[in-house]
């Protein structure tokens, strides 16, 4: 008996897109169509993962064609993708001397209504500007890259895309000239080559207070208590952040955030030292 695998069914980028476990693409397509009450139905694969649905209309015996076809693709293996990105982070960290490394910090674009997201890796070399790495392995696509560029540009001094040979040519076309490109092995994700260097800019939120916003309320209250500052017991995060920013300089705040993130275990955002040996 064939093993069931996960399929993504629906229109790309649609809120009605869903995951279905099925032995093959056709079975997943039928399950998706049936869930949306196209019954009785016939589902036809018209090519490249696209399906048309035929079902009964409002009048008995009068079939109609569903006006928008849907697509069925094999769902990516996110566990494998996570392993790939971890290997890539390790390889990229090895390019640096004594530094702090931070996994998946929250970043934003400029402006009140700027987009937001997470950087795959932030490196803070001792005495130098920050480096923000976006990782694109063979399992990734570049669809979001143009939306991610302003986020990195607003937060890091140097911005680098770490990717595999599959994406290098497209990356050259999509990235600003100031961005660096590092070539990764598609299987081991070790660094093969530094295709082009990244140009540094003076704007560098990551060396300022960017990472302070990653801290939880309990962590902020702990920092305030350890420094004998006065704040209400249940003061909200923004009150704690304001108090700390009014009391300490950027370098001290950054060190507080890094030390706190370093003490975390098993969390998405974590900081650690590299290159000290």
Image: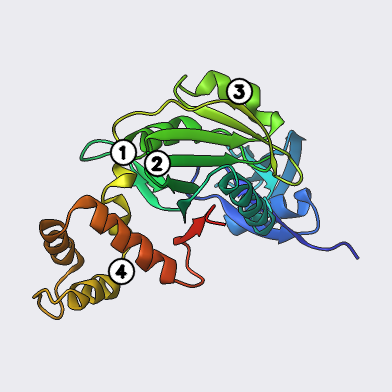
- Disc number placed over residue 216 in the picture, else none: 4
**Residue hosting label 2:** 130
Q: Can residue 119 be seen in this view?
A: no
Question: Which label lies toward us, 4 or 3?
Answer: 4
Q: Is residue 90 visible?
A: yes
Q: Residue at x 46, y 47 (%)?
A: 123
Residue 67 locus on image (x, y percent): 56, 35
What is the crowding at mark 2: few (fewer than 14 residues within 10 Å), some, or many (at least 20)? many
Residue 97 locus on image (x, y percent): 52, 46
Is disc 4 in contact with disc 2, using a CB cutoff of under 8 Å? Answer: no
| Between discs 4 and 2, the one toward the N terminus | 2
Is disc 1 in contact with disc 3, using a CB cutoff of under 8 Å? Answer: no
Outermost residue on the bottom side: it is 233
Taking the image as shown, residue 107 lies to the left or right of residue 229, namely right
- CA separation, marks 4 and 2? 23 Å
What is the crowding at mark 1: few (fewer than 14 residues within 10 Å), some, or many (at least 20)? many
Q: Residue at x 41, y 53 (%)?
A: 105
């Amino acid at each position: 008996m064939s093993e069931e695998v996960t399929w993504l069914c629906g229109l790309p980028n649609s809120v009605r897109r869903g995951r279905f476990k099925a032995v093959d693409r056709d079975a997943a397509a039928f399950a998706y169509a049936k869930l949306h009450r196209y019954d009785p139905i016939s589902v036809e694969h018209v090519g490249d993962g696209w399906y048309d649905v035929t079902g009964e209309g409002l009048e008995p015996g009068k079939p109609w064609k569903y006006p928008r076809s849907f697509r069925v693709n094999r769902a990516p293996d996110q566990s494998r993708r996570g392993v790939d990105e971890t290997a890539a982070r390790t390889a990229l960290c090895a390019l640096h001397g004594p530094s702090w490394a931070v996994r998946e910090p929250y970043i934003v674009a400029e402006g009140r209504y700027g987009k937001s997201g997470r950087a795959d890796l932030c490196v803070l070399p001792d005495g130098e500007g920050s480096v923000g790495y976006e990782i694109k392995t063979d399992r990734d696509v570049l669809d979001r890259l143009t939306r991610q560029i302003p986020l990195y540009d607003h937060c890091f001094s140097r911005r680098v895309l770490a990717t595999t040979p599959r994406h290098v040519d497209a990356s050259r076309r999509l990235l600003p000239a100031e961005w660096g490109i590092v070539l990764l092995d598609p299987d081991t994700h070790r660094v093969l080559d530094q295709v082009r260097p990244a140009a540094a800019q003076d704007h560098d939120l990551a060396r300022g207070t960017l990472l302070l916003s990653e801290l939880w309320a309990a962590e902020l209250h702990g920092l305030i208590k350890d420094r004998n500052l006065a704040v209400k017991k249940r003061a909200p995060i923004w009150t704690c952040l304001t108090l700390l920013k009014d009391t300490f300089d950027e370098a001290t705040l950054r060190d507080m955030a890094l030390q706190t993130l370093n003490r975390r275990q098993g969390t998405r955002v974590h900081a650690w030292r590299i290159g000290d040996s």
